[in-house]
Image (spheres, rainbow, N blue to C red):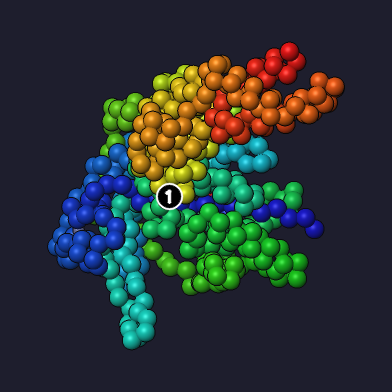
Amino acid sequence: MQYEAVIGLEVHAQLLTGSKLFCACSTRFGAEPNTQVCPVCLGMPGTLPVLNAKAVDYAIMTALAVDCVVNPISVFARKNYFYPDLPKGYQISQYNEPLSSRGRLDITTESGQKTIGITRIHMEEDAGKLIHGEGADENYSFVDLNRAGVPLIEIVSEPDMRVADEAVAYLKALRDILVYLGVCDGNMEEGSFRCDANVSIRPIGQAALGTKAELKNINSFKFVKDAITYEIQRQIDVVEEGGKVIQETRLFDSTRGVTVSMRSKEEAHDYRYFPEPDLAPLVVNEADVERLRENLPELPEAKRSRFGDAYGIPAYDAGVLTSTRALADYYEELVRLTDEPKLSSNWIMGEVLRLLNGNGLTITGSPVKPSAIAELLAMIKDGRLSNNMAKEVFEEMFKTGKTAEDVVKSKGVAQISDEGAITGIIEAVIKANPENLERYRGGKDKLFGFFVGEVMKAAKGQANPATVNKLLKEKLNG
Ligand code: ADP
Ligand code: MG
Ligand code: ZN
């Protein structure tokens, strides 16, 4: 029997607001435990939540970026469950009436383009964090409520993906959009962008969906791929051995590369959702939606295709250069200064990114600004520097922050383009190699390379290669 997998993803993204969803506490990551808390997010009786308007704007911007309908009225609901990191005993979320619905996201994989449906995007608050003690503290667990009440959006996809690669492509595309919008930092390690993957299998040709397992705790793109790939095979094995896949929640154990059962359907929570009585329904008026729509930045996909069209660079280049907004801005600035789209792309993708990566920097922290590279590229164009020399000069610029002109002056690197100087070197080389000159003139054309090499050596690699070629030919043949 041939099977196909069906995958639907639920993504939780932390919104980049300064304060929490229902109180004024800071959302900063990494603070001392329980220093960013107040009676509201501690769930004290008698407190009242006040909705963060900026979080609503960010959620709407995300909805618009993935073509969702923004619902004019949505309703916050209490999702009740008991857990030590949840001081109120319920999480404020949205349930039947979410902020937005019915969107789409285009993804590209090796098998081509595909559109993945987005079921809904709703707002909710995060819970706190449990830290399980080690060593002397191994009998204790600690709770840090700094994260309790931090604003999240949950983005739920349709079960439209069929292989792990599509899930990874979806997540990458979604994360890029959130980061471009500036509504989420996309940091998977810190948990600002996390994903649950729902996976089922069915015989190929069957329309009905199979029973799904929900995979939790996946915090990198690689783990998403590994967890889904493992889970698909596990379900196929279960069915092939005559068993039945059961509906359950499974955890991905990244050290062993396997998924393990966490709780089955029987143990599933009954959340007893009901509308949050302390918050009025959220009314979003059309003017606000339009204002946000008009201010959306250019999104990754649009930028990629514009870069291809406007600058005539290959799709690969456009993909790399638009990987972040800052890198794209850097590239566009360099092109504006040089009017050399492909050369600029080569330099950024080659030298600039190589040194940035090697030094653990991103483009925002680059010690070399586009204007300084433009100056360097102009020196190549003028024939003052060869490409290889320019690379050396660039390394020095990167290390010291000096301009190309300063590096060239202080290091004495400059390409010799002066015909008189080069002729002098050529004549000396010819004089020193009378036998090879004879053999060359006798028909051994290959010796031309030998002479080029000798001239370059004598010029310490600083002679303009085109001039050397031209003059050497004249001298050897004349
Ligand atoms: P639940 O109520 O268990 O959370 P939902 O219907 O809300 O289930 O779906 C949650 C996620 O699971 C969605 O992303 C959806 O696309 C996906 N999903 C639903 N049914 C299946 C299935 N049979 N196989 C794979 N994914 C599924
Ligand atoms: Mg769910
Ligand atoms: Zn608070």
Circle 1: residue type = Asn
Whether residue 249 is visible, yes or no, is yes
Crowdedness near tag 1: few (<14), some (14–19) or many (≥20) residues, C-alpha within 10 Å: few
Q: Quadrant of the N terminus?
A: bottom right
| Residue 83 sits in quarter | bottom left
User: Where 323 falls versus 224 (above or below)?
Assistant: above
Q: Position of residue 180 (x, y in %)?
A: 40, 38
Give the camera-side residue of 235 and 163: 163
Q: Position of residue 231 (x, y in %)?
A: 63, 63
Give the camera-side residue of 320 and 206: 320
**Residue in the image at 33% along x and 58% along y:** 126
Q: Position of residue 137 (x, y in %)?
A: 33, 84
| Residue 326 sits in quarter | top left
**Left or right of 474 on screen, residue 287:** left
Q: Residue furthest right?
A: 442
Q: Position of residue 93 (x, y in %)?
A: 34, 54
Q: Quadrant of the C terminus?
A: top right
**Residue in the image at 50% along x and 43% along y:** 354
User: Where 133 falls versus 65 (above or below)?
Assistant: below
The residue under label 1 is 359
Give the camera-side residue of 24 and 132: 132
User: Where 172 falls versus 338 (above or below)?
Assistant: below
**Residue in the image at 52% along x and 24% along y:** 416
